[in-house]
Image: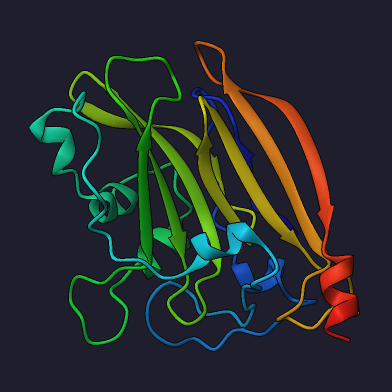
Amino acid sequence: MRRSVVPIATAAGAAAIALCGVLIAIASCTGSGGVREEGIVSTAASASAKAYATHNAKSPAPSSAMGAAEATTDPVGLVKADPKVATDIREDLVACGDSADSYPVDTHFGDLTDSRTDDMIVNVSTCADGVGIGSYVYQLKNGTYQNIFADEQPPVVAEISGSELKVTHQVYEPQDPVSNPSGEDITTYRWTGSGFTEISSAHRAYKATKDSNG
């Protein structure tokens, strides 16, 4: 069972599918606070794993090309109000621990669509182990951010690579412990004017790291 990847602006919103079903062969659910807390642990073997860590929703300010309204955008409120985000992700997105403003949301700004203002990438993760469960790209149109990309197939993290969108998924084989995936799949997308088109994909194995760890 897989969540959906929606690489074009006109695609319908992702259906709500429980993450436990996606990861049933890997880990179990704990049901504690924040967005779902499944037991996959990110690995230091992947540079992209740093992005899985739980972040405060208050991201660094965007570039000077952005106006004051964009700079104060609330990514948590944006995700929770977005009908293109899976229902369970929206409903379960709450602050982690005792801090009222520490959400498992990470935001980045950059030019992906060659527009006058920076686009915003939002990565949503679990509170317990920082597993990426949803990555989204928002474009500012007519004064509001609109969802133009969604990937809800965990573990997932999206980032800006030059003017392109890079989406990374860690890969597990049946025998892999949750702390030691076998590798990662990296997909690169480019904006075509009306949506994102996949331009390349690659798999990177962690074999050397796994062998050294025994």
Residue at left offset 59%, top offset 22%:
190
Q: Is residue 64 left or right of residue 38?
A: left
Residue in view at x 81 percent, y 52 percent: 204
Whether 105 is drawn above or below 209: the answer is above
Asked if residue 133 lies left or right of residue 98, the reply is right
Residue at point 36%, 60% (across, down): 105
Between residue 15 and residue 182, name the one nearer to us: 182
- Screen quadrant of the N terminus: bottom right
Q: Quadrant of residue 90?
A: bottom left
User: Taking 133 as reference, is 195 above or below it?
Assistant: above
Q: Position of residue 186 (x, y in %)?
A: 71, 44
Task: Measuring from the top left, give residue 174's x and y in whole percent.
Answer: 89, 75
Q: In the rendered view of the protein, which quadrant contains the C terminus?
A: bottom right
Nearer the observer, 151 or 49: 49
Left or right of 76, for residue 66: left
Q: Residue at x 49, y 24 (%)?
A: 9
**Vertical position of residue 191 compared to residue 193: above or below:** below
What x and y, as percent, mark residue 82? 34, 44
Residue 86 visible? The answer is yes
Left or right relative to 114: residue 24? right
Residue 58's spot in the image, x, y percent? 22, 57
